[in-house]
Amino acid sequence: MSAKLDTKALKQLDQAHHLHPFTDFADYARHGGRIVSRAEHIYIFDSDGNKIQDGMSGLWCCNLGYSQERIKTAVADQLAELPFYNNFFRCSNQPATELAARLCEVTPDRFQRVFFTNSGSEANDTQIKFVHRYFDLLGKPEKKLIISRHNAYHGSTIGASSLGGMSAMHQQTMGLDYIHHILQPHWFEEGADLDPEEFGVFAAKALETAIDELGEDKVAAFIAEPVQGAGGVIVPPESYWPEVKRILDERDILLISDEVICGFGRTGRWFGFETYGVEPDLVTFAKAVTNG
């Protein structure tokens, strides 16, 4: 184990070699950052000794905090027994098998299969492939377009960042041309003189308009978080999700619920789609499934 460095030396080493995501490099070069040294319950401690309540839950992922002894013991035991093996070529292992079965128990009956990836970004990339392959197998290869929302975040890979609607994520990749974006259901910012429920229906109608313009025979899926997380924790009006579901069901278009942030209790239910009473066709999960 390497010897511990003091805070100043650690910060200098970090600035010299570590590229941080979602970071202004010029600002970081001028002011440096924070070295997190340990965590306990819902608090993190930095190398200067400051105790900080972790409102970010790690990165929206440590839903059970940092001090669950059962988790620590399970991780240590698994590392001792089988640190890693792939699930390609018909191979599996007991934890992966049991987790897949448990996930199917806590989701609606229609969900009976789980595909594991390494991150939420990869999971959303996989959803694109699933949707395209699904309609190919149905003899509808023209259904390739996917609709998302402005100011959405669905990951950082090229596919997932294209699904997202944050302009900064598109400045270099330019986005995939079969992905289109519509109005976000942000009443406070976009609602004008409408009350919340009127705006919920109005925002959902933006989906209907986009489908009509693009052609429902070409649109394969709509992807969204039940509550937009990284985009500002945008809670949609109650009228929004039922209207979205009606529009999609009438047009043979799949609904992908991105539960990377909302899933595993953050909205009070196992998944955010349950909170709003809609049932998607596909579900993306990550983060809290491993508590970080």
Image (tube, rainbow, N blue to C red):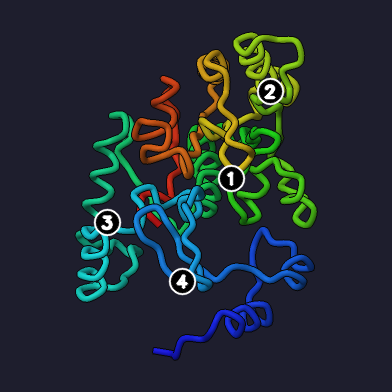
Where disc 2 sits, the SS reads: helix
How many discs mark residues in the rendered view? 4
**Residue 42 horizontal/vertical position (percent):** 39, 52
The residue at 35%/46% (across/down) is: 114
Residue 251 x %, y % = 57, 18
- Callout 2: few (<14), some (14-19), or many (20+) C-alpha neighbours within 10 Å? few
Tell me the tag on residue 17.
none
> Along the polypeptide, which appears first: circle 2 or circle 1?
1
Give the alpha-carbon distance from disc 2 to disc 1, as whole Å.
22 Å
Identify the residue shown where x is 50% and y is 68%: 46
Q: Which residue is mark 4?
A: 37
On residue 188, the disc is: 2
Q: Earlier in the sequence, mark 3 or mark 4?
A: 4
Quick one: label 2 or label 3, which is nearer the N terminus?
Answer: 3
> 19 or 286: which is nearer to us?
19
Residue under pointer 3? 68
Which residue matches tag 1? 154
